[in-house]
Amino acid sequence: MKAALLYKNEKKLRIEDVPVPEINDDEVLIKVKAAGICHTELHFIDNVLNAGKYPIIPGHEVAGIVYKKGKNVKSLDLNDKVLLYYYRGCGKCDFCINGQENLCTNPEMEYGFINDGGFSEYIKARETDLVKLNDDIDIYSIAPIACSISTGIHALNMAKPELNDRVLVYGVGGVGFGLIQLNKLRGCRVFSASRNDKKLDIAKKLGSDYNINTYNENIVNKVKSMGGVDIIYDLVGSNETIKNDIEMLNKAGKLVLIGYDGSNVNINPLDLIINEIKIISCVGNTRYELEEAVRLFNENRIKIVIDRFDELKNINNDLEIIRNGQAMGRIVIKFD
Ligand SMILES: [Zn+2]
Ligand SMILES: [Zn+2]
C-alpha cells in the first residue's frame, strides 16, 4: 500500500510502498478514506516534537471503513464507517480510569505520534479505538473532526467559558474555526484574530462577533480599547502572542495554551499575579470529547472548514501551503 513516511531529520515526507498491516483476532483493518493534515505534522518535520519512532506514518485525523476484522471484534461490521480516536491509553493509570486518556502516563498507542497514523491506504486498530459513524455520514468531510473540533471541545471544557464571556480566538485555522463555533454555542462574545482576511471572513461566517487583522492592527490596543477579554485561546503560542495575551486579558482572565512554536517565553510573574490570571494548557482530547464532536456534527450544530481535498502524492505541497498560512481550513488527503 502507498503511505507517506517521515524519516528522522527529513524535511519532506517520502511516499513509499509499505506492507498492509496484518491484524490479529482483536483488531480491525480500516481502509482509510480521508485523513486531515494538522499543523502538528509540521512540528514533527521541524523537530519541535519528536515522534515515538522513525520512520513514522503521520496522520491523526483518520476516517475510513472497516475492511477486515478479527474474530473477536463484535461491535463493528465490514463496511462500517469509523473514525479513529488517536489515543489508546493503558487503561490502568489514574488518568485513564478518570476518562483522561490524553494524559495517560503509559499510552499503548498514539496514532501518528508514537505509532503509525493515517497517511496510508490502510491502518489497523482495535474496535475500542474507533467511533462508529452513521451510514449516511460524509466520510471525507468528517475526518478533521478527530483533532480540530475535538481539541476545541477539550479546550472549551478546560476554559469553562460562561454566558456572555468575552473570548478571543488568537490565530484562526482548523482548531480556531471550531473554537469560534463552540464558544458561540456557549453564549460567548467571540473575537477572532488572524493575519489573513480570508480566514477572518470565514470566522465571521461561523459567528465571530469581532475580527482583528493582526497584520494591519495592533491587537493589544484594539482589544483593550474594546474592553479586554476574559478568555484567550492562544493557537500560536509564541513569545509575542503570549506577551500580548497577558496585556489583553481582564482581571481573573484565563489564558488557554493550545498552539506552540517551540520558542521560550519571557513572562514576568507579577503581571499574572496582580491580575490573578490563570494559565490553562490543553493537549488533545478525551474519547468522550471526540464522541461529543461527532454528535454535534450529526446534529448540524458545527461545521468543519475544509480548504481542499488532495491526493497523498501531493502531501508535501499541502504541508507547505499550511506552513505558509495559506490553507483556509483543513487540507484533507482523500483516498479512493
Ligand atoms: Zn492535530
Ligand atoms: Zn493510562
Image (tube, grey):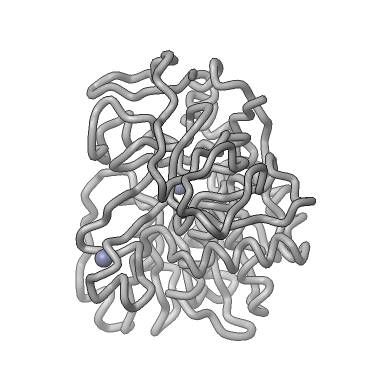
Q: Nearer the viewer, residue 285 or 264?
A: 285
Q: Position of residue 5 (x, y in %)?
A: 37, 23
On the image, the x and y values in percent for residue 161 come to 53, 80
Q: Position of residue 147 (x, y in %)?
A: 50, 52
Q: Is residue 288 visible?
A: yes
Q: Residue furthest front?
A: 71
Q: Determine the residue positioned at 38% across, 18% down.
A: 12
Asked whether 44 or 291 is in front, the reply is 291
Question: From the viewer's perspective, is 49 left or right of 15?
Answer: left
Residue at horizontal 28 percent and vertical 75 percent from the top: 272
Q: Position of residue 174 (x, y in %)?
A: 57, 48
Choose top left, top right, bottom left or bottom right for residue 332. top right
Q: Is residue 39 above or below residue 74?
A: above
Image quadrant containing the C terminus: top right
Q: Residue at x 61, y 71 (%)?
A: 183
Number of numbered callouts drawn: 0
Q: Is residue 159 left or right of residue 10?
A: right
> Visible in this render: residue 217?
no
Residue nearest the viewer, comparing 100 with 191: 100
Residue at point 39% right, 15% down?
14
Is 241 displayed left or right of 216 in the figure? left
